[in-house]
Structures are given as C-alpha cells and as structure tokens.
Amino acid sequence: MPASVLPFLPVCLCLALVLRPGEVSRCKLGPLVRLTHDGLDKYRPSWAPDGHRILFARREPDGSHIWQYVLDVRNAKSAPRRLTDRKEPEYHGVFSPDGARVLFAAITLSGTQGNLDIAIVSADGTGLKSIIGDQGKLAHQEWPSWSPDGRRFALTSTHEGNQEIYTAAADGTDLVRVTQHAGLDAHPAWSPDGRKIAFATDRWGGLEIAAVKPDGTGLVRLTRSPGLDDYPSYSPDGSRLAFVSNRDGQFEVYLAAADGSGPFNLSHHPLRDTFPTWTPDGRGITFVSNRQGGFELYTQVLEP
Amino acid sequence: MRSFGLVPSHASKGLTRRALLGAGTAGALGLTLGDFLTLSASARDGRSPARAVIMLWLWGGPSHLDTFDMKPNAPIEYRGPFEPIATAVPGIRICELFPGLARRAGRLALLRAVHHESNDHGVAGTIALTGSISGAVGLGGAENSKALRPSTGAIVGRLHRGDPGSLPPYVILGSPLHQGLKRAVGEGGGSLGGMYDPFRLDYEPGVGLKLPDATLPDGVSASRLRARWDLLHRLGGDDAGTAGNTNGPIERMNRQYELAHALIASRQSLTALDVGREPASVRESYGPHRFGQCCLIARRLVEAGIPFVQVNWSTHVEGPEDGGDGGWDMHDRYFEVMQDRHGWMLDRALSGLLDDLHDRGLLETTLVVAVGEFGRTPKINDRAGRDHWNTCYSALLAGGGIRGGQVIGSSDGRGEQPVDRPVTPADLGATMLARLGIGTTDLTGIGLTPSGEVINELF
C-alpha cells in the first residue's frame, strides 16, 4: 500500500462501515400501530392474506389456558374471537395462503400428560381435524408454516428422537424430513418463492438462522451473531427477512436481506420485542411487545 | 391496651382468644392491619444478621444448565441453544436470558452443587422446603413414614418474636403446591402443628390481591361463620388456642375459624397490600405478571416486618401443555418456553426485587433465595426438553449480608455431578435460619433435631 494512501485510510474505513455492501437500505419507519389492548401474553401473530384478520395465541389470566384468537382489525372496537371452542391449549396458528384454513398446534391432555399435534380448521372455526399426531411414540409437532402454494407445510417434530424440520402435505400425509443434525432445529418459515425454508438452529452454538431447500439440500447459514437469532419471517416479495435477536443485549426485531446480510435493529426498544411477521402487503412488520406493560400486538409501518 | 394477633406464637402466649375477640370487630381488626402496614419493621432482638427471608420458589425445577451453571463446551446434546454472557463480575457467566441479573451479579451468590436424594417433585419439594425426606409423599402415593418436619418458614414462624397484632410471620404468596392432581407436602408446620402453617395470599393480574384461605365452603355465609366462630370461642375457653396439643383436630379447626374470621373482617384493610398503590414505575420494574407482582408484595410484607415470605412461581409443576399453570417442569418445549416466558419473567422480577430492596435499604437485612426442588437432566431428551435431575443443581442467593459476586461449588463438565463443595437443602435451610438468628439451641428448644450446616462461605 503506498504511504500516500495511509492518511486517508481512516476516512475510507469509516465510509466502508457506513456503506457496507449488501446492507438492506434502512427503511424509513412510519407509525407504530397498536392492535390489541388486553395486556395478556401473546404468541406468534399471523395475518390472513386479506390483511383484515390477524391470528394469535393468547395466555388467559389463570395461566392455565392458551388459545387461538382472531382479530378483525377493520373495527377498532371489535374484540378478538376464539378460533375454536377447544378447552385444551392451542397455539402457533397460521393462515393458509388463500386465507381459508388455519394450521395450528393442538394439545390433547391425558391426565397431566400433554401431546402436541398439528390440526387444521377452516378459518371460520369449523371442520377441526388433527392431521399429524404421534408417529408411533409420544412426540411433539408444532410451528407449522405453509408453502406458498398451500399444498404443503413445514413443521417441527420430535418423533425421530430429536427436534427436526419436516414438510408434509396439507392433509398431514407424506411427512418428509428436511434437517439432519443432533442440534435443535425450530420455527421454520417457507419462502414466498417456495425454494427455501428458513429456520433457527443451535448447530453452530447459540441460536442462528439458517435456510435449506425443501428437499434438505443447500443448507446456508444466514446469521452470525453473539446471542440468539430466532423466529425468521420472509417478506411477501422474498427479498427480506425479519427475525428476533438479542445481539444488542435485549430482544429486538431485526431486518436483513433474505441472505442474512445487512441486519439492523428495527424495533429499538429497551423492553421485549419478538415474534415478527410481515403484513400481507409487505408494508409493515407486526410483532409482540411489552413496551407499554403487557404483551400486545404492534405493527411497525415501513414507508416505501 | 388491646392486643391481638392472628397466630399465637411462643412470644404471645399471654394473648388470649378473648382478647382477640374483644378486639375483633371488623373495624378494630382492620385498623390494626392497616396500622401494621404503616409501621416500620421492629427489630426483634437486634442480634440477627438479617431480619427477613424472601424465598422465590421455582416449582417444577429450573434447568441449571440454562440458568446459572451453563456448559458451553459440553456436547451439543447437552449444552442447549442458549449461550452464557459475561456479568458484572469477571469470571462469572450466566445464561443470556438473564441480562438483568448479569448486571447485578455483584450482589449475587450462586451455589452450583446443590443435591439431594429424590427426583420426584413431591418428595424433592418436601426435601427442599423442610431439609428432610421425612414425611414426603411421592407422585405414586408412597409416603415416608417418619414425621414431616416443618418448613423453614414454619420454624421461623414458630420462633418469631413478633409484635402482637401483626400478620402471621410466615406468609406464602400462592396456593398450595401440586404435582399433577396431587398436593405436595412440606410448606406447613409439620411436626410443629398446623398452627404454624403459612398464611396465604395471592395476586391475579387484573383482579388484584386474593386471599386463598378466606374462601368459604359452599353454603357458609360470613355471618354464619362468625356465629360459629363465636360459639367455638365460648366453648373452647380463652386458652384453647395456645395450650397443649397444637395439632389436634379441634385446634386446627379453631385455627381455621380464627383465620377465616380475621380475613373476612379485614378484607377491606388488606387492600392496603394492593400493589396498585405502588408507584407505576415500581410496579413495572417487577414485570406485569403474577410472579413479579407477588415479589413486590413480598417486599411490602418484609418492609412491614414479616420475617419469612415465600413466593411460589406456580401452583403446579406443569405448564399449560400438561394441564398446569406454568411451572418449570418442562419435559418438552423447554427452550421455547424459557426464551418466551420463564427466562425474562424471572430476570425482571428478581432484578426488580433486588433493586427495590436495595433502594429502600432493606437488601442488607433481607436474604433472597431463588431455588426449585431440583435441576434438570443435562442431556436434552427426545422431545426438546429436559427431565428431572436431583444430583446437581443451582441456587441463587442475594442480600441478607451475603458476599455477592461469588460462586460456591462446582459441577462437572456436563453439569451431572458436584465436583466440589456440595451442599444440600438442609444446609440451605440452616443458612436461612442462621441469618435470622435461629440456631441449634432454638431448634432443640422446640423439639426439632437440627439438620444441615450453615454455608459459611456465603458471608
């Protein structure tokens, strides 16, 4: 390196830090819209494709019940309604791409032994049916995520002795194992183009986000950070990935390119922000936060 | 001068039920309980290093590997997805889910080699709360035939030199503990008698303070209860509650009527315990959930002079997935629940409690203990969870004159067995009692055989 360049090196390094190649342009943030007000714990919000209905699980005040609710956001005064009339816990609900069906993790209790199965129900709450249960031994199935064409879904299952990612046909048949590792794999998110499934894994130490093709090949590591990265969610156009990370010491919603590059802290709040999911139009990220006391749903609007 | 109390203690043997009845109008009783809340704690003998213990009872058994004894170099089947983070004390690292406690590590002492002999929740609960397996009842119903020892809190209640008119000295925030549908034993007076069972309170977000023991049987009105209580009083004589057998059925019934009567009469004044009266910033610092708000109530009780308060994390060991109410017994979904609920709730509530006690000048005289009945299997099971592990687990202590920023004891590379300085629940119980100035002579004086050794390195 010529000595004449050295005086300019600090400036060049600073510019390089500011203009990191591949960094997702930092969106201009619009308003933060609060969607719920009951103060109760909530888990995994999921939008219907119409952008009017949002599904989430809620822990009831007695601490013993977790049920799925649907909220119609068009009427600010409307209260969430139960998705089903089940008495036992249910969560991880997600609308199908056409909005007509919901997959969720349904627990059946035998005494004090709970069993997590995947169930499907029409969006109006009718036609409830368990579609993936134990595969010969007590096992847990959870966190379903639809393929973009609605013909299959990804999920996690422990039926082969470790928590792995699988896919299955929409009726629960044709279970195909996607991941093969002694670590824990969790929270799959199927990309809008159908070519990748992002998920969280501890195979590299700590929780990181990875992506794999639905046939189990082409594993790629997407995040490399101290602390955990979890709950990936692809934007509707597939170009970006939202996820939760505590890399800055607290749980925040991060936004990155779909390849994991250029991550930045979107939510920036000293309290807890988690379970990010995109609005169907891609103009907002909905997440759960306790920034105003109890856990509520918020949508951070992203300006174009 | 009128004097009355809810629980006759050895220091208030002169207190008769007639005196209690004479003073026991609703207004007078309510006034006393209200006054109690405004009084600063009186020094009982001025010699004990601490004046109170708050025990955070993490029912169900937290994993030591995912809290305070992480094993990042263990095989992937053991270490789990969470990573250790540095704390304010060089060399001490704890789980990343506890950033608040990491910042406060200078106040904390960790015991990393606690152990005992049972991995059954019910039996382990009895051991952890009483220091002994005597009288324990397992999930299958098998009982240890020896007499049930009193809990540490009940011993404190028995020996407490309290002010007449104060609330009972042993308070549990939470309902009686259960594993499955079976009630666990070990929270009560044991061989000392039902007179020394805990006084229970609870808190429900959105509802407020609850009085579990004040729930009347169906068909029994408050006026009818009062009439029956008055009749019992006339039949029983003035000293019925303090002499002779304190564990007989009549005495136990008397105790229940007295308690119920007092609670009904004082329901209004007990609203003074409502955490809604605390500044919003203080309430929020503990977290909005039941456990956090109960920790705040515990601080208020200690501030008012109660020497032993236990805060139960849950009633059941199980989470909702297994028919419970969110305990630590997570044989499956362990890491998801830890990340989304248990980790941050404990971090926030305990951090808030330590700060609040410190800010009020109470931390030096209040020993805070956070522990469950055991740890969890170092090897992750086939359902992404951890099972029961009693041979080595961790406890956290703070305040009460302990030397913070230290770790006592260690486990092996996988967290399976103690390597050095193993301690038992009996040792922990002896340490709590010693901090409150209760020694072996006091125990033998009330017919108890001392057990456990004080963990002197803590101080």
Image (spheres, coloured by chain):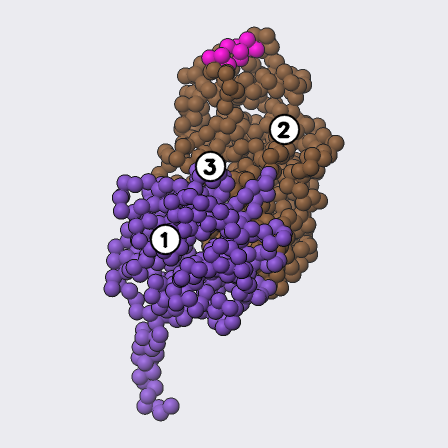
Chain colours: A purple, B brown
In magenta, the rendered stretch is B223-233
The residue located at (33%, 42%) in the rendering is: A37
Q: Are marks 2 and 3 on the same chain?
A: no
Callout 2: residue from which chain? B
Query: Label 3 belongs to which residue?
Result: A62
Dot 2 amino acid type: Gly
Q: CA distance from mark 3 to mark 1?
A: 31 Å
Dot 1 amino acid type: Gly
Q: Of callouts 3 and 1, which one flags the residue occurring earlier in the amino acid sequence?
A: 3
Residue B45 in sight from this viewpoint: no
Q: Which mark is residue A99?
A: 1
- Up the image or down, B328 lies above or below B446; here it is below
Q: CA distance from mark 1 to mark 2?
A: 58 Å
Nearer-the-camera pick, B212 or B420: B212
- Up the image or down, A239 lies above or below A119; here it is below
Q: CA distance from mark 2 to mark 3?
A: 28 Å
